Amino acid sequence: MKIDLENIDVEKLEKVALILKTIGHPVRLGIIGLLTQDEELSVNEICERLDLTQSLISHHLSNMKLKGILQSRRDGKQIYYGLKLQEVVTVVKCMAECEI
């Protein structure tokens, strides 16, 4: 397959590269998968569904939030996360449709 590099939007490529670098880990992809099914989940809900420790999940959530992929809100002691950058869903769908 030949890719026409002359007509590629550089800004778009940079955005996709940032998304791929940020979500390019199995745990992060799992979190993104959950947040495409539910608009918002607490840290505890994400931990339970992925069967992983809170410290590991919190590390990945804070990194994705720092990169602008996720947003969060606090309700008492609970922190809820949701997708901030909706283009992430498009990128993940593209990856899912790829034949590797």
Image (cartoon, rainbow, N blue to C red):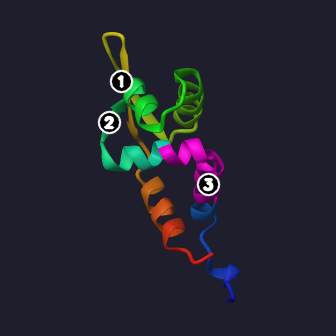
Tell me residue 66's x, y (percent): 57, 32
Residue at horizontal 47%, vertical 42%? 31
Q: Quadrant of residue 76?
A: top left
Three-letter amino acid code of the residue under disc 3 = Leu
Question: Which quadrant is the C terminus positioned in?
Answer: bottom right
State the mark number for residue 40. 2
Q: Secondary structure at mark 3?
A: helix
Nearer to us in this view, 27 or 14: 27
Q: Which residue is mark 1?
A: 73
Tell me residue 90's x, y (percent): 44, 62
Tell me residue 48's x, y (percent): 42, 30
Instruction: Classify mark 1: residues with Cα within 10 Å, few (<14), some (14-19) or many (20+).
Output: few
Q: Is residue 65 above or below residue 44?
A: below
Earlier sequence position, callout 1 versus callout 2: 2
Three-letter amino acid code of the residue under disc 2 = Glu
Q: Quadrant of residue 9?
A: bottom right
Label 3 close to label 1 by CB (< 8 Å): no
Label 1 close to label 2 by CB (< 8 Å): yes
| Furthest-bottom residue in this view | 1
Q: Which residue is mark 3?
A: 20
Q: Please check the rendered image and state whether residue 16 is part of the magenta-colored stretch, yes or no.
A: yes
Earlier sequence position, callout 3 versus callout 2: 3
Magenta span: predominant SS is helix
Question: Which quadrant is the N terminus positioned in?
Answer: bottom right
Q: Secondary structure at mark 2?
A: strand
Q: Please check the rendered image and state whether residue 49 is part of the magenta-colored stretch, yes or no.
A: no
Q: Which residues are magenta?
A: 14-30
